[in-house]
Amino acid sequence: MAIDQKINSSSQTRQRNYLARDFDSLRGVLLDYARQYYPNQIQDFSDASVGGMFLDLAAYIGDNMSFYLDHIYGELNYDTAVESQSIERALVNAGIPINGASPALVRVTVYIEVPVETPGDETPNVNLLPIIKEGTTFEATNGVKFTLIEDINFAYSANGDDSYSLNPSAEKKIGRVRQDGKVISYLLASSGLCASGFETTETFSIGDFVQFRSLTLSHSNVTEIVKVYDDLGNTYYEVGSLTHDVVYRNFLNTSGDSNLVKDVMKVIPAPYRFVKTTSLDTRMTTLTFGGGSSDSLQESVIPDPSEFAIAFPYSKTISRVPINPEKLLTTNTLGIAAINTTLTVVYRYGGGLYHNVGPGTISTTSALNIVFPKNPPQADATRVRKTMDVSNLESASGGEDALTSQELVSLIPMVKNSQERIVTKEDLLARVYTMPANFGRVFRASLSTNKNNPLATQLYVISRDLNSKLVVSPDTLKLNIKKYLNSYRMISDAIDILDAQVINLQLKFSIVIDPSLNRSSVMSKILSKLQDKFTVKNFFINQPIIISEVINTIFTVSGVISVDKVQFVNVAGKYNNRVYSDTIFDVNAYTKRQIIFPPPGGIFEVRYPEVDIIAKVVS
């Protein structure tokens, strides 16, 4: 009977508390547990005792495990994740590309002087008309390089043959004139699109076959992979996934309808291909190549099924034959990996706000790639080449710094729900903000309904210059947005891309400061807080200004007794040797209940916070 009671008492379920989460609560629960179930074994649980040490060690381990579980659980959600690897994994799963700083885009105008064939001719000598090839590099006064990404044709062939004439799009005016009044040369001008950044070439020595080989480029903020090839003559194409076995490429249309259709799209097989990924921490770019060997390129795409069975060399009897999934990765269906060769990668990198140079700053030719289709004498070609000059008539725009982790994470809900197409307004904004960096990037975008067309959406965009001031997005950037969005939009939808109106404001206010404090010190703190509040990063298109929030910001500074007056004033054009937006804005007409609303598609900007925030101390 005593033995049964002992067994029953030892098998009783002991009370446990699973609610303790931190060190102190865990130690308290353990102490209660020890005193309840081990009252005769250990009685001293003071800090200096052995029992206290055991409690501390157990509570310490429990505290670490609790923190670890909470941390792991938090890393599963992009809203609470803090580790860059978890954030990067969430971005990849949502389909958000991680890009570095984006380059600026600008149209440059090239000027050349071409002599006539016979004095008095009305056109320049056709044999001396050049083509400035893409890849030509220009340099701005601040050292930023701009690469021509399209040919500038002074020589034009309507039929695609050797019969060239002056391109109708080129501007022409009389250059030099002889004493008898006959023209001996013409000045020609034509423009082409340039992208900022640097172009470089890297080579990699490739040895034995490695599945899905990864190569990391040495520069960060890679904007475009120009070309990848090996010394065996194979060209590698960038694809969105290694399962994509073809790419599309545009070629110059040389047929009779070239005036209507500039390029012809062709499908190119891509057995040699790669995917591009960018690290969130370093913004370094890695190229991952296919998993098939080039030795299998000539084999059938469908492998022999018998090769998929796992062999059992030491077994005479088997029940079922398992499939070896590794064999699926050795075929060429996921692309071909290079072996025993040298791989060459040509790419562009670099970007940021400081690439948005002003007009007239691109004036130097760093590397000229010029050809003369009619092959004139070398001396004549050299004379024409020496007359070449370049300039940009407009500011470069579209250059932006890389999106931060928080900015990328904020796009996850929109992109995750879009499913690779534009249905809602959130889908459209997600596509605008995740456009590939080499196309340029807008600073802010906003949507509104077109009152005249229920199927159309108005997309307002705005960019920044190198000084972080708001500027109108260039037409080239808007054309890139149009082409990029066209493949995602619904066939019945229309998108009107419009320029946002920039409304420049001055803030004037009067305050009463505690006379016992230093007025200059208090005023300096107020101005600093207001300048942080009115930085351009804190404003969005169609965002109003709430005057009470401005007053509250002033009151957060210790020493402010009263705010006597707060007034916003519109400034436009040139004012005190400063250049503002040309938008005229009636502040009073758009103010309701102490809230200043912008016009549709408008964005407020305190363009020069250091001088446009004006304070006055009253007594």
Image: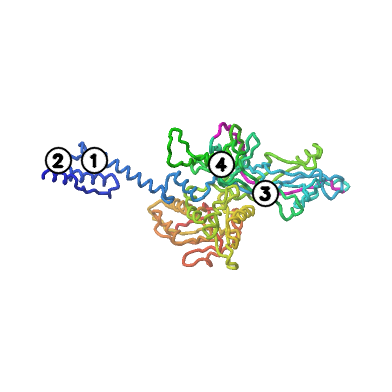
Is residue 287 something that shows in the picture?
Answer: no
Q: Which residues are magenta?
A: 181-209
Counting residues from the N terminus, which is met first, the one under dot 4 or under dot 3? 3
Q: Quadrant of the N terminus?
A: top left
Instruction: Label 1: state its secondary structure.
Output: helix
Q: Residue at x 19, y 47 (%)?
A: 12
Instruction: Give the image location of residue 460, x and y in percent.
Output: 57, 59
Left or right: residue 237 versus residue 411 is right
Q: Which residue is mark 3?
A: 266
What separation in Å lies between label 3 and label 1 (alpha carbons)?
A: 73 Å
Camera-nearest label, 4 or 3: 4
Dominant secondary structure of the residues highlighted in magenta in the image: strand
Q: Mark 4 is on which residue type?
A: Pro
Q: Quick check: marks 3 and 2 in contact, CB under 8 Å?
A: no
Counting residues from the N terminus, which is met first, the one under dot 4 or under dot 2? 2
Q: Nearer the viewer, residue 46 or 388?
A: 46
Q: Which residue is mark 4?
A: 303
